[in-house]
């Protein structure tokens, strides 16, 4: 722990902490042996052996020149493309310390078979990089995708950001931080953690506007999750606190829930806030997730709903564990995979194109077509929320 604060030069090896960490490791081992991981891997292998091989266009480890000065250093981009212009999904890895390419690429191939263009960036991971470098990589990937995706028959006006676990946090943090920076509604930051700011310049945001967010098993309130880690004796061995500066103040600066709530309470025009955020946000979580309890996701959903996002949905599946949404997406024949593909299809369809990187007035004008919807939001709000929180038996 070379990046630990001076007051924490070494992890205190108290018997209570050792017991908690050991219990956590045993729980991880048990979930991998009895949960979806090994069965899904075996089913995926059988599916690949028994199914007819299809020709898939894959550009591996290609770096395209652009006016982004340090994209070469942030990693490479793997693009899986289909034969016609399609919606684009940027899939962010699910770990702070490992890229999980063995899972990411099968997921990308499965999504490609459904007609999407899928971009899988190599995010700088801990300890080589921390939250600043990670968010910067996501920002550059969004910009690269908008600039180049037509080469792969993708629609730059239909870009969706999808992430699992840490990838869900990075996706939501990147988008929400950019919106807050555009509105000059970022909280005062006195820490050493500096999230990159792409804009605004001349009334324009630095990032193209993301059409939607598709988030699986994520953490959106970092302080709540730190308290959860502390309860389990993991706050000094888990990567997330160290990635985010290891202080309570720096954790707040990396919390999508805190940033959005601050902007909601301090922005002079909530209509601008609603107009700049993605039009569709889809939150999916499992009620058996022992790594990231769904409480944070429920609270994040309530906050997004209060902002007035045109379409925000939350689905909590019964008997679903933390890794299930990601690992089951590699097996097209699994029931959960079918349900998740339906959720993704629902999120990506019937959305009119939006202007990318437009001025505040232009983007605010985009939201005028949704005014009738927002005038009626209060009517039947309880019914709508109940409908969006659906429990499905797997």
Image (spheres, rainbow, N blue to C red):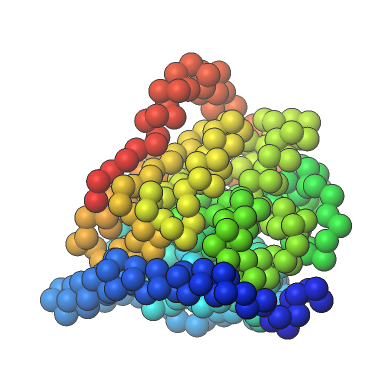
Q: Is residue 181 left or right of residue 350?
A: right
Toward the viewer: 45 or 226? 226
375 versus 119 height, above or below? above
Residue at 52% x, 81% y is 62
Toward the viewer: 42 or 31? 31
Toward the viewer: 309 or 33? 33
Residue at 45% x, 45% y is 282
Q: Which corner quadrant of the image does residue 244 belong to?
A: bottom right
Residue at 82% x, 66% y is 192
Measuring from the top left, give residue 193's x and y in whole percent: 78, 64
Measuring from the top left, give residue 46's x and y in whole percent: 17, 76
Q: Is residue 65 visible?
A: no
Q: Is residue 146 left or right of residue 2?
A: left
Residue at 29% x, 73% y is 33
Q: Which corner quadrant of the image does residue 229 belong to?
A: bottom right
**Quick one: which residue is furthest to the left in this view?**
50
Quadrant (top left, top right, bottom left, bottom right) of the N terminus: bottom right
**Quick one: which residue is furthest to the front in this view?**
15
Q: Report the number of discs.
A: 0
Toward the viewer: 182 or 92? 92
Q: Which corner quadrant of the image does residue 363 belong to?
A: top right
Measuring from the top left, give residue 164's x and y in whole percent: 47, 61
Measuring from the top left, give residue 155's x and y in whole percent: 47, 55
Q: Is residue 12 visible?
A: yes
């Amino acid at each position: 722990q070379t990046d630990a604060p001076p007051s924490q030069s070494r992890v205190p090896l108290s018997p209570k902490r050792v017991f908690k960490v050991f219990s956590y490791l045993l729980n991880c081992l048990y979930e991998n042996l009895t949960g979806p991981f090994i069965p899904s891997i075996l089913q995926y292998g059988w599916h690949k052996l028994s199914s007819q091989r299809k020709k898939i266009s894959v550009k591996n480890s290609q770096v395209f020149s652009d006016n982004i000065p340090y994209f070469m250093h942030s990693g490479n981009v793997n693009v899986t493309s289909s034969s016609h212009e399609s919606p684009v999904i940027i899939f962010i890895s699910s770990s702070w310390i490992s890229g999980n390419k063995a899972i990411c690429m099968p997921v990308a191939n499965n999504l490609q078979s459904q007609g999407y263009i899928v971009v899988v960036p190599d995010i700088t991971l801990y300890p080589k990089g921390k939250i600043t470098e990670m968010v910067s990589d996501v920002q550059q990937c969004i910009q690269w995708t908008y600039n180049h995706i037509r080469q792969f028959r993708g629609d730059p006006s239909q870009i969706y950001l999808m992430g699992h676990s840490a990838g869900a946090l990075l996706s939501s943090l990147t988008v929400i931080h950019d919106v807050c920076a555009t509105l000059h509604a970022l909280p005062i930051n006195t820490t050493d953690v500096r999230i990159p700011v792409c804009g605004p310049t001349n009334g324009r945001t630095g990032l193209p506007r993301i059409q939607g967010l598709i988030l699986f098993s994520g953490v959106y309130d970092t302080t709540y999750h730190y308290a959860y880690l502390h309860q389990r004796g993991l706050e000094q061995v888990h990567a997330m606190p160290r990635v985010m500066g290891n202080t309570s103040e720096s954790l707040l600066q990396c919390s999508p829930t805190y940033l959005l709530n601050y902007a909601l309470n301090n922005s002079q025009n909530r209509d601008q806030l609603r107009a700049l955020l993605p039009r569709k946000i889809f939150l999916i979580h499992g009620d058996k997730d022992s790594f990231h309890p769904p409480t944070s996701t429920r609270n994040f959903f309530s906050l997004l709903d209060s902002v007035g996002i045109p379409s925000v949905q939350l689905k909590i599946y019964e008997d679903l564990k933390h890794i299930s949404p990601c690992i089951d997406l590699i097996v097209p024949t699994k029931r959960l995979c079918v349900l998740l593909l339906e959720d993704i299809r629902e999120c990506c369809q019937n959305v009119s194109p939006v202007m990318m990187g437009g001025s505040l007035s232009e983007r605010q004008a985009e939201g005028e077509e949704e005014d009738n919807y927002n005038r009626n939001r209060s009517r039947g709000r309880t019914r709508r929320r109940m409908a969006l929180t659906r429990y499905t038996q797997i």
